[in-house]
Image (cartoon, helix red, strand yellow):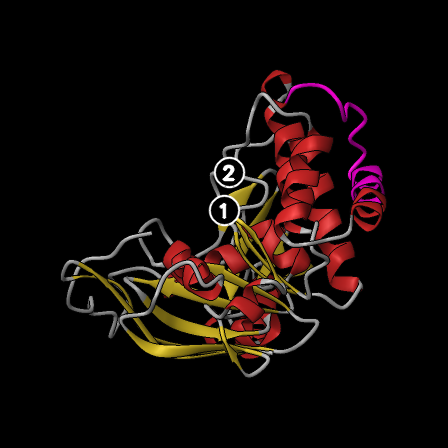
Amino acid sequence: MIEVCDLRKEYGGFVAVEGSSFRVDRGEVFGIIGPNGAGKTTTLKALAGLLEPTSGTITIDGKRADSRETRRLLGFLPEESPLYEEMSPRSYLRFFADLYDVPRDVADDRIGRTLDRLELAHRDRALGDMSKGMKRKVAIARSLVNDPDVLIYDEPASGLDPLTTKYIIEFTRELAAEGRTIVFSAHNLYHVEEVCDRIAIMNEGRIVTEGSLPELKSTHGETVYHVFTTVEVPDATAEGDRYRRTVEDMDELDAVREAAIDRGGRLEDVRTVEPSLEGLFLDVASPERPGGEKPPGATEG
């Protein structure tokens, strides 16, 4: 289990993360989303023990995130992950397995099985000769070489083609099904919806809200109804040979039905429109939202 309490991180007086608190249960997939500069990367690096908080605490299974014991249980994938391009995937992953003191026979078996799952065939080609998607798969394999319980992924599918992106998202889902705890950020909100059990939205270094997607929709979203009629009614928009009006409740819907009947027409169709994560994100993270004053200090990451 991951517990973050009042995390604050400053860089020379600039505030990157301010007062963030959340927990991630074992086996859960927790997504962190937000605009550029919201503090996502800083938060993930602090979780991985790579940054020391200015204040606040981070513990993983009751131990400090930056302790040597905890780091050996983590797998971290940064957004930018340069590789040793003169090495092959096999030699590169063996090198990192050695750093974790993984026995060679165990490492070779684990590396082989992971690369099989990632469908990476060219295991002895120089990394410098590989595509970005292939390199990203090798970086993911590196995060698994020590068989970690906790994975921290920063934009795992950033800049990849749609096919490779789909594969990596599905692979992330498989890792979660194995019971690993995963925390990751992504700009593609569809991927977040597909994979995450719970989501935190960050803005200006703060967590604005968090919860499961249904909880976020219930708290911040609004279900509306598109009502289609065969005749024009007040506030309706023409769409082909019929008219559409958006309403928020059943009373309004009934009023539209009656207005259509009064004009010699009828109500033809009703479609429910659920709030999307993108819509929630744009509303919650907008600096113009009510009560959305910017916190003091600048942000990074």
Q: Position of residue 250 (x, y in %)?
A: 59, 77
Task: Give 157 or 102, whichever is nearer the viewer.
Answer: 102
- Return the x and y of residue 249 as percentages of the image width and height: 54, 75
Which of the labelled discs sits on residue 129, or is there none?
none
Q: Residue at x 55, y 63 (%)?
A: 71
**Which residue in the protein does label 1 denote?**
78
Q: Picture coordinates of residue 53 (x, y %)?
A: 32, 69
Q: Is residue 89 left or right of residue 81?
A: right
Residue at 58%, 59% (x, y): give it: 226
Q: Is residue 258 magenta?
A: no
Are circles 1 and 2 on residues that touch, CB within 8 Å?
A: yes
Query: Residue 34 vs residue 141: left or right?
Result: left
Q: Quadrant of residue 113?
A: top right
Quick one: which residue is furthest to the top in this view?
A: 129
Please tell me which residue lies in front, 288 or 69.
69
Q: Is residue 39 left or right of residue 297?
A: right
Q: Residue at x 65, y 32 (%)?
A: 162
Q: In the image, which residues are magenta?
A: 111-126
Q: Is residue 123 magenta?
A: yes
Q: Tag on residue 81?
A: 2
Judging depth in this view, the residue of 48 and 244 nearest the camera is 48
Q: Amino acid at mark 2?
A: Ser
Residue 264 showing in the rendered view? no
